[in-house]
Image (tube, rainbow, N blue to C red):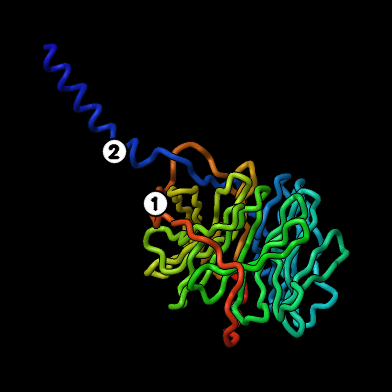
């Protein structure tokens, strides 16, 4: 009888192991969805502050693109348009705890801006022909992408007022989407074959890449938080776009909004609150509020283990490449 009981216990333990391996780990859990009112075809949350305020982009039925803020209490700002916008494209990209936002607008080319309330302050990286400001931390440091005199589209960071431009080795374009309190930057780059991959830049300037979930045919990283937990999206060979979370050095979590073929996770704050969007069957995009939970994982995934390399902070002059407009 003793031997029989031991065999039964061993079998029970063995059967339990695959369950633990398949489902243990963090998960993305949906909180709710929201839409900007008034006939908007696309509500695109971009970043979330540590206090829970959201900045984003809305696109109306005539194709006009404007920024918006969703405050901590759920109230929404009026649509925000940079006064120098001459093409109907103003995009809110980043937000910090003082509810200062950053973004970009288009006139003769793309320019960056900072705004608080209805007051705008426009910004271009000195000497650059193209600037987008994509991320902003609580110290007022910021990140983005620009085209310097070299003609190579670069990522940049402004830390304590000092601007550093950098490129991922071998990339034709590098975009820096968010900067956290430790001055770690997350974003994506385009390789020589035209494929997008995620990366992060550590506080010492080293670059860690590529970030690619298993099955990705193109990865875009949008944000990181103070723990350097990273969010983004990737497309697969069947044309489905999935949201994902990457926790360095090697943990990938995939999230799909139920029934949707397009899910994007764009921002995450230090409490694990995530913002993004999904596309419905009628072609309307809706905002997502979710959280990263330490419980059971909804879709554990594998992917590349990114490797650390020195940054390339100065780039060799070459003919100007096609301008890469930042993804949303």
Res 50 seen here? yes
- The local crowd at label 1, few if under 14, some if 14 to 19, many if 20 or more residues have their Cα within 10 Å, is some
**Residue 181 image position (x, y, % from top left):** 68, 48
**Residue holding disc 1:** 301
Which residue is denoted by mark 2 in the rendering?
18
Q: In the rendered view, does 1 fall on the left or right side of 156?
A: left
Inspect this view and state whether residue 258 appears. Answer: no
129 w.r.t. 118: above or below: below
Q: Is residue 246 left or right of residue 174?
A: left
Quadrant in the picture for the C terminus: bottom right
- The outermost residue toward the bottom is 319
State the CA–CA distance, disc 1 to disc 2: 15 Å
> Can you say whether 100 is above or below 239 in the image?
above
In percent of the image, x 52 and y 61: which residue is there? Answer: 310
Q: Earlier in the sequence, mark 1 or mark 2?
A: 2
Quarter placement of the N terminus: top left
Q: Badge 2 local density, few (<14 within 10 Å), some, or many (20+)?
A: few
Pinpoint residue 264: horizontal percent, then vertical percent: 55, 60
Displayed quadrant of residue 284: bottom right
Tally of numbered discs: 2
Of 146 and 27, nearer the camera is: 146
- Tag 1's secondary structure? strand
Circle 2 SS class: helix
Residue at x-position 49% and y-position 51%: 246
Q: Residue 180: image x %, image y %?
A: 66, 51
| Residue drawn where x is 63% and y is 62% of the image | 177
Q: Nearer the viewer, residue 283 or 128?
A: 128
- State the image quarter where residue 77 is shown: bottom right
Q: Position of residue 135 (x, y in %)?
A: 68, 60
**128 vs 118: above or below:** below
């Amino acid at each position: 009888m003793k031997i029989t009981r031991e065999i039964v216990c061993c079998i029970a333990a063995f059967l339990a192991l695959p369950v633990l391996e398949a489902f243990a780990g963090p998960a993305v859990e949906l909180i709710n969805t929201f839409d900007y009112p008034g006939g908007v075809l696309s509500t695109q949350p971009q970043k979330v502050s540590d206090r829970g305020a959201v900045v984003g982009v809305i696109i109306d039925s005539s194709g006009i693109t404007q920024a918006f803020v969703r405050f901590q209490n759920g109230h929404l700002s009026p649509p925000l348009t940079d006064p120098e916008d001459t093409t109907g494209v103003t995009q809110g990209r980043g937000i910090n705890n003082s509810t200062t936002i950053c973004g970009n607008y288009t006139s003769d080319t793309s320019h960056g801006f900072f705004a608080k309330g209805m007051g705008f302050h426009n910004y271009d990286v000195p000497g650059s022909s193209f600037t987008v400001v994509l991320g902003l931390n609580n110290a007022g440091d910021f990140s983005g992408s620009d085209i310097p005199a070299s003609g190579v589209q670069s990522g940049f960071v402004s830390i304590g007022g000092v601007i550093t431009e950098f490129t991922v080795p071998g990339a034709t374009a590098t975009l820096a989407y968010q900067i956290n309190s430790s001055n770690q930057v997350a974003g994506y780059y385009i390789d020589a074959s035209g494929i997008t991959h995620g990366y992060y830049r550590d506080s010492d300037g080293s670059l860690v890449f590529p970030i690619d979930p298993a099955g990705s045919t193109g990865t875009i990283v949008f944000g990181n938080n103070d723990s350097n937990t990273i969010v983004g999206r990737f497309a697969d060979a069947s044309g489905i776009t999935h949201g994902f979370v990457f926790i360095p050095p090697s943990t990938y979590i995939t999230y799909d909004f139920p029934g949707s073929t397009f899910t994007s996770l764009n921002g995450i704050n230090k409490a694990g609150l995530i913002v993004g969007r999904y596309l419905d069957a009628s072609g309307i995009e809706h905002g997502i509020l979710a959280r990263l939970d330490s419980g059971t994982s909804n879709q554990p995934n594998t992917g590349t283990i990114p490797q650390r390399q020195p940054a390339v902070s100065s780039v060799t002059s070459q003919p100007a490449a096609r301008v890469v407009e930042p993804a949303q």
